[in-house]
Amino acid sequence: MSARSQPGPALLARERPAGVGPGPGPTLPASLRALVRSSLPFLLLLAVWWAATTALHPRATVLPSPAAAARAAGPLIAEGILPDYATASLKRIAFGGGLAIALGVPAGLLLGSNRLLSVAFTPFLKFFQSLSGIAWLPMVLVWFGFTERTIQVVILYTALFPIVFNTMTGLRTVPPRLADGLRALGAGRWRLVTDVWLPGALPSIIVGIRLGIAYGWRALIAGEMVVGAGGIGFLLFQSRSFQQTARIIDGMVVIGLLWIFLDAGFLRPLERYTVERWGLVQR
Amino acid sequence: MKRGDSWLGVLPFVALVAAWWVASHSGRFSAGALPRPESVLAAARELASTGELQADVLASLGRLVLGAGASVLLGAGLGILAGLNRFLGDLLLPLASFFSAVSGIAWIPLAIMWFGLGTVAVTFVIWNSIFFLVFFNTVLGVRSVPRIMEQAVRTLGGGHRVLVLQVFLPGALPYIVSGIRTGLGFGWRALIAAELIAATSGLGFLIFDASHYFRTDRILVGIGGIGILWTLMDGAILGPLERRTVKRWGTVAEP
């Protein structure tokens, strides 16, 4: 699909060579132009939102104006609530997600290393993956109470199963002939692991990590709503109790921004780096 | 998979239940913290005999069908429109990717403010968590259809209707179906979370309500119900849907 999008920019560049811009004014640098283009939809959304609130005058508890939402963000930031809660949520996802990766990848590799093991555990892993950590929340609350640990357990549980499952399937889908080929050339067991099995399974492992962290992030928001020990989810829920819709919207924007930050700052680089570095691209 | 492998999948479940049985009979945990397997079965029978369990299962399923149906129709329809129009697609794709980052659970508080507690709020949350994924994937799918197929049909005199029904929809189908699958994964989780917080019926509510009375046996009935229901849906609907649609109409891209 990238093949089709490539001609676009190339054609544009040919039609309008550097320095021969349409007007006499200074041309924007490419990066700035990309920024303007990608922020345009959001400005448009803001305009629609603004127009809707000025034309329809909904109650502030139903839909506050963009200005009101921006005003509500002021004290949230000034009082340090928003930075504190955002940090709390990020720390939780980093800890829970990191632990899920550290436990899930080795477990998946172990299960994937043997055909019978992977056959036996496929329905089991599918079953527990579909049981989101959120469903376990009341049970975990009974075990650990309204504490930090409850949230951690829910994130860990939610992120763990997609990671184990995808690591296992990734390992099983590496064509055996690749290992046979290397073995025929005299490679040892360790060499097979580092040169065939791990790189072959890597794309699938990364998919599992992305999915696990994405599920974990949502479970975190839900967990914070219910447990109430700080965090962005708690901010949203508390604001609902006090009918502060502007704060709810601010919280949602922060959730979106944090996820984009997590995705662009961690998950995508991880994907690019590992798959490019060690990945075994199949034709 | 070889013959005789199918029973292998049962083994981990048997081992887990056995470990659970031993742990709950060891006397180290109170019945509140870890109910025994037989008391969970008894709780399930009790809930089923009053019709409560069936009502909650139907409530959850109904919301899922309603929310998912609306989001698939809207997401695929609007996605095809936005996929055909480059300007519209470029405008809406960044919005769709932002909203799929905030989708689902984060909308629960706002949904309560708008619709109050109940089915409408829950259905809205499910719709929301599936729609953007289906939309996003449909746009990508339509854009992935090779131009040459469109040109071929045009050359043979095909109009807009033919193009959409016989070129773009089938061509985008593998993307749409994978969008639906991923979306349902998120939607299912959002449904349980939304019922936990914003509903008065459904499996999520069953679990949450039981936790108020420390009825952990009932909590486990609800959790088991969620897992079994998803496994049934996955086996009966999602798997076959994917196999049939992609096989039947899919133009699987050759690498």
Image (cartoon, coloured by chain):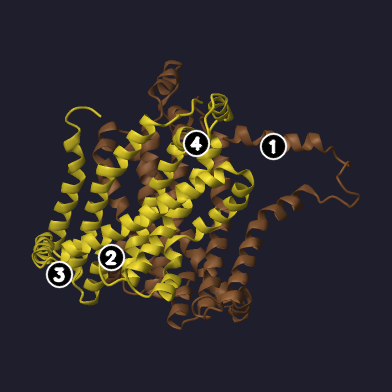
Chain colours: A brown, B yellow
Q: Which residue is mark 1?
A: A8
The quarter of the image holding the N terminus of chain B is top left
Q: Which residue is mark 3?
A: B31
Is residue A2 toward the left or the right of residue B195 in the image?
A: right
| Callout 3 secondary element | loop
Residue B198 rendering spot, x and y as whole percentages: 34, 71
* Residues marked 2 and 1, same chain: no
Q: Which residue is mark 4?
A: B168
| Amino acid type assigned to the residue bearing label 3 in the image | Ala
Is residue A266 toward the left or the right of residue B251 in the image?
A: right
Q: Nearer the viewer, residue A116 or B27?
A: A116
Q: Which mark is residue B204?
A: 2
Please, is residue A115 above or below residue A133 in the view? Answer: above
| Amino acid type assigned to the residue bearing label 2 in the image | Gly
- Distance from the alpha carbon under mark 4 to that under mark 3: 58 Å
The image quadrant that residue B43 belongs to is: bottom left
Quick one: label 3, few (<14), some, or many (20+) residues within 10 Å?
some
Chain for disc number 2? B
Badge 2 or badge 3: first in the primary sequence? 3
- Distance from the alpha carbon under mark 4 to that under mark 2: 39 Å
From the image, state whether disc 4 or disc 2 is nearer to you. Answer: 4
Chain for disc number 1? A
Q: Nearer the viewer, residue A152 or A66?
A: A66
- Distance from the alpha carbon under mark 2 to that under mark 3: 22 Å
- Distance from the alpha carbon under mark 2 to that under mark 1: 48 Å
